[in-house]
Image: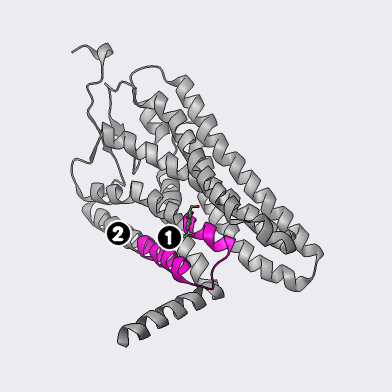
Amino acid sequence: MDLKNGSIVTEFILVGFPGQWELQIFFFVTFSLVYGATVLGNVLILVTITFSSTLYSPMYFLLGNLSVLDMCLTTVTTPKMITVLLTEPKTISIGGCMAQMFFLHFFGGAEMTLLIAMAFDRYVAICKPLHYRTIMSRRLLNGLVILSWIIGFIHTMSQMVLTVNLPFCGPNVIDNIFCDLPLAIKLACIETYTLELFVISDSGLLSFTCFVLVLVSYTVLLVTVRRRSSGDLSKALSTLSAHITVVTLFFAPCVFIYAWPFDSFSGNKILSVFYTVITPLLNPIIYTLRNQKMQGAMRKLWFVRVSSAHN
Ligand SMILES: *[C@@H]1O[C@H](CO)[C@@H](O)[C@H](O)[C@H]1NC(C)=O
């Protein structure tokens, strides 16, 4: 076979979490439950925001769209990860692997942009309350959502056009729970040093810059609020701490995974679980359990539905 002339590898092996079958079953049950709860929680948020009359505000508009992205992001990785746990051999086709990388970076890039938009929304709401409704117009909101999809698309395309035609002919084992660029690129049987650098600067720098940007904007916010009354501060703190938790749990793993200048390290899989499995579940938990307005809207919505069903 002529190795130079094309790929002979047609599928990759995902290592997943190695261990005995008891451990595989444990992960299978845990991740299935988490995935189910993620879809359920985000659908609940979407339904509540869409049908409730009390949640018509820019923040909830963005939050609803974040729920959509969260569901997409976790659906790209988790179902495949769950099935791979219980199958042997743990394979994924090259096409499936490419699709996974494409959509992971598509939805991931869009979610990063949307998280910045949400930080901007909080900034305007708290620092310019009188102009909030004028600045965060429907037009701007639609624009921000569309922009996030465009940025996600450009981000993923820029990396995938260079990845999709790579020849694979050697080892095909990916030591992760899903296909992702840093490890997949290394398996190509041509020199990929430049491409690796490109991915580090594209994905790594993007997540790092977004992370710093978001943290700075929340810091400015907190400082601004502190200058006012202490009542304002405690109220703002409870909203902002929710946002900051979500943002940190999403960005910090990305920064580590993509901007880490060394070869893969052992914490890689756990960090991958964080931003693709845990964070999408965290949003509904944080925004519903800690948000009185959301709880009120849900109760009202269910009460109306249930009582109209009885009539
Ligand atoms: C998300 O954004 C789209 C497009 O801007 C908008 O039509 C939709 O209502 C938003 N979703 C929610 C739940 O607000």
Query: What secondary structure is marked by label 1?
Result: helix
Q: Is residue 17 above or below residue 285?
A: above
Where residue 21 appears, as percent x and y from the top left, is 22, 53
Magenta-drawn segment: 37-66
Query: Would you say residue 165 is visible in this rendering?
Result: yes
Name the one closer to the observer, 129 or 104.
Answer: 129
> Which residue does the numbered mark 1 point to in the structure image?
281
Looking at the picture, which amino acid does disc 2 mark? Ser
- Residue at horizontal 52%, vertical 53%? 249
Please name the amino acid that badge 1 sits on.
Leu
Task: Identify whether 232 is placed above or below 174.
Answer: below
Relative to 31, 282 lies left or right: right
| x and y percentages locating residue 73 in the rendered image | 40, 49
The response on whether ligand 1 sits within 8 Å of label 2 is no
The quadrant of the image that shows the N terminus is top left
At a point 70% along the width and 70% down the height, the residue shown is 234
**Neighbours of disc 2 within 10 Å: few (<14), some (14-19), many (20+):** some
Residue at screen point 46% across, 80% down:
300
| Residue 36 magenta-highlighted | no
Q: Magenta segment, principal secondary structure?
A: helix
Q: Position of residue 6 (x, y in %)?
A: 26, 16
State the residue in front, 122 or 131: 131
Residue receiving disc 2: 32
Q: CA distance from mark 2 to mark 1?
A: 12 Å
Quarter of the view holding residue 241: bottom right
CB of mark 2 within 8 Å of CB of mark 1? no
The quarter of the rendered structure image containing the C terminus is bottom left
| Residue under the image location 45 percent in, 75 percent down | 298
From this view, report whether residue 233 is shown above or below residue 221.
below
**Other-residue count near label 1 (Cα within 10 Å), few / some / many at <14 / 14–19 / ≥20:** many
Residue 16: give x, y in percent of width and height. Answer: 30, 44
